[in-house]
């Protein structure tokens, strides 16, 4: 093989390896996900090549408000999705967005959950559809997330809407859920 080909191949492998490393880092880091979410949800839109910036009719949220909503959405969707055949994986997954003390509570609850393969399948998939920020200070927030749940019970499927109140606190890792209560 030629030296030029080996250099190109090496550069290609480095680029692909770097991209995979970035993807894995973002996947494992909720604070990096919050940062990316904040960057990608800007309300300014470049409308032409002369760099004219036009504000759309959306309400501009502060970076904290966007991070609070991102954490609330992700936590609510994970927390509210489960089945009788899972092992509490929804709670362990939601724990990634919780404070350390609340994460331990969720992991303890998950550890006591046993799959039930002997009965008819019952599963719930949750989707956050609306947010109501009840209160927000520099380090605390209370947000109510409206969650649409698709419930599968054997051969029957239904859709319901529930509300989940989340108390969030700002930590060194970003906004984290400190309590969750179905309303």
Image: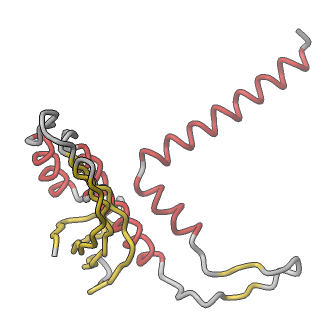
Could you say where residue 174 lies in the image, as x and y percent from the top left? 36, 64
Looking at the image, residue 18 lies above or below residue 151:
above
Report the colour scheme: secondary structure
Could you say where residue 79 lies in the image, as x and y percent from the top left? 25, 57
Check the picture and name the quadrant holding the C terminus.
bottom left
Q: Residue furthest front?
A: 155
Left or right? Give the position of 167 relative to 97.
left
Could you say where residue 11 lies in the image, as x and y percent from the top left? 77, 29
Q: Residue at x 67, y 88 (%)?
A: 55
Q: Residue at x 18, y 44 (%)?
A: 84
Q: Residue furthest top?
A: 1
The answer to which of 109 and 25 lies nearer the viewer is 109
Left or right? Give the position of 180 relative to 150.
left
Looking at the image, residue 123 lies above or below residue 58:
above
Looking at the image, residue 109 lies above or below residue 68:
above
The answer to which of 123 and 114 lies nearer the viewer is 123
Residue 127 picture quarter: bottom left
Q: Residue at x 25, y 79 (%)?
A: 142
Could you say where residue 25 lies in the image, as x and y percent from the top left? 49, 43
Q: Residue at x 76, y 30 (%)?
A: 12
- The number of numbered discs placed on residues in the rendered structure image is 0
Check the picture and name the quadrant holding the N terminus.
top right
Q: Residue furthest left?
A: 112
């Amino acid at each position: 093989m030629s030296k030029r080909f080996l250099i190109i191949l090496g550069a290609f492998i480095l680029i692909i390896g770097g991209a995979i490393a970035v993807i894995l880092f973002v996947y494992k880091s909720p604070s990096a996900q919050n940062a990316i979410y904040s960057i990608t949800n800007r309300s300014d839109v470049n409308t032409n090549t002369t760099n004219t910036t036009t504000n759309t009719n959306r309400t501009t949220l502060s970076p904290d408000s966007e991070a609070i909503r991102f954490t609330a959405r992700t936590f609510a969707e994970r927390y509210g999705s489960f089945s009788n055949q899972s092992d509490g994986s929804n709670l362990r997954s939601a724990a990634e967005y919780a404070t350390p003390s609340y994460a331990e509570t969720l992991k303890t609850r998950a550890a006591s959950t046993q799959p039930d393969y002997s009965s008819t399948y019952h599963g719930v998939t949750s989707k956050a559809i609306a947010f109501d920020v009840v209160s927000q200070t520099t380090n605390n927030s209370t947000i109510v997330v409206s969650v649409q749940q698709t419930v599968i019970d054997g051969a029957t499927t239904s859709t319901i809407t529930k509300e989940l109140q989340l108390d969030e606190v700002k930590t060194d890792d970003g906004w984290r859920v400190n309590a969750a209560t179905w309303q």
